[in-house]
Image (cartoon, rainbow, N blue to C red):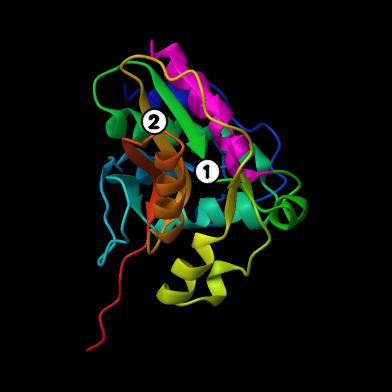
């Protein structure tokens, strides 16, 4: 379903309050917040399997647009931490490409995003993944996919995962979420796809997957924009 030419050409930033979200270049013509060079870099990415090693129990097959680096990393940081909410549209469209690769042949798909904690949502003026899901779902629907978005989970207060090691992330993820309500209305042939922006250890996605599985909705795959790469000590 890739049509990134349309993605990047349908709207050009006319006002330049900030530099390129991917490289910081100023005084350049931006498309959705990225300069032409970063647009080409993002266009070159293709969804591919990304599995942490070791993978936590219950982690479904995971597909990422690319490694957590370059224009993709900087764009995500600008969107999440620097308040550039306008990047939700291009990043959400890129996430739709990952969903299409993760779900397989077009068919009914249910998107379930990992929710932000209330504290994180306040700091970011809204749930950052929820903002990405809307353009992702719209792009999939425009391509003929029967898409629905569910928000069955509530995030409980927890320590910022940046401060935790792998064992700490796994322990925190086990008690990080609660179901809002019982899950009903599964559609025939439906693919459930979990959504997150970045996968590191996979602990959060695995915990969410196990919770949904216990409620009768087993995810087929997880779709993320970026995957961190494990560094090996020499």
Instruction: Please name whichever residue, 119 or 68, is drawn nearer the observer in this view of the structure.
Output: 119
Can residue 26 be seen by looking at this rendering?
Answer: no
Q: Secondary structure at mark 1?
A: loop
The tally of labels here is 2
Q: Is residue 216 left or right of residue 183?
A: left
* Residue 44: x %, y % from top left: 30, 41
Task: Name the spot of residue 35 as percent of width and height, x first.
Answer: 50, 44
Name the mark nearer the viewer: 1 or 2: 2
- Secondary structure under badge 2? strand
For disc 2, the neighbor class at 10 Å (few under 14, some 14 to 19, many from 20) is: many
Residue at 64%, 65% in the rendered image: 158
Towards the viewer: 38 or 26 = 38
Hey, which residue is sitting farthest bottom in the picture? 234
The residue to which callout 1 is attached is 34
- Residue 231 in magenta stretch: no
Check the picture and name the quadrant holding the N terminus: top left
Residue 172: percent from the left, percent from the top? 53, 67
Report the Cα–Cα distance between label 1 and label 2.
31 Å
Residue placed under numbered mark 2 in the picture: 192
Of 175 and 9, nearer the camera is 175
What label sits on residue 95 in the rendered view? Answer: none
Marks 1 & 2, CB-CB < 8 Å contact: no
Magenta residues span 127-153
Examine the image and state in which quarter residue 110 appears.
top left
In the picture, measured across the screen, residue 190 lies left or right of residue 85, that is: left
Up/down of 219 relative to 160, above or below: above
Residue 61 visible to the viewer: yes
Queried whether the magenta region covers residue 141, the answer comes back as: yes
Q: Residue at x 38, y 10 (%)?
A: 144
Dot placed on the residue nearer the N-terminal end, 1 or 2: 1
| Image position, residue 97 (x, y; %) | 36, 31
């Amino acid at each position: 379903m890739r049509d990134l030419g349309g993605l990047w050409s349908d709207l050009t930033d006319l006002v330049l309050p900030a530099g390129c979200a991917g490289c910081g270049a100023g005084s350049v013509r931006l498309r959705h917040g990225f300069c032409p060079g970063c647009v080409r870099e993002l266009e070159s990415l293709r969804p591919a399997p990304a599995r942490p090693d070791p993978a936590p129990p219950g982690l479904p097959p995971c597909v990422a647009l690319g490694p957590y680096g370059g224009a993709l990393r900087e764009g995500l940081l600008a969107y999440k931490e620097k308040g550039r909410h306008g990047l939700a549209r291009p990043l959400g469209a890129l996430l739709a490409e990952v969903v299409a690769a993760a779900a397989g042949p077009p068919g009914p798909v249910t998107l379930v995003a990992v929710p932000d904690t209330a504290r994180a949502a306040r700091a970011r003026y809204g749930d950052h993944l929820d903002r990405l899901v809307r353009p992702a779902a719209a792009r999939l629907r425009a391509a003929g996919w029967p898409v629905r978005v569910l928000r069955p989970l509530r995030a409980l207060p927890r320590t910022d995962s940046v401060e935790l090691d792998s064992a700490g992330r796994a322990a925190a993820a086990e008690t990080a979420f609660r179901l809002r309500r019982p899950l009903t209305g599964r559609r025939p042939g439906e693919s459930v796809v979990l959504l997150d922006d970045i996968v590191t250890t996979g602990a959060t996605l695995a915990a969410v997957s196990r919770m949904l599985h216990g409620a009768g909705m087993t995810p087929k795959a997880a779709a993320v924009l970026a995957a961190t790469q494990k560094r090996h000590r020499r």
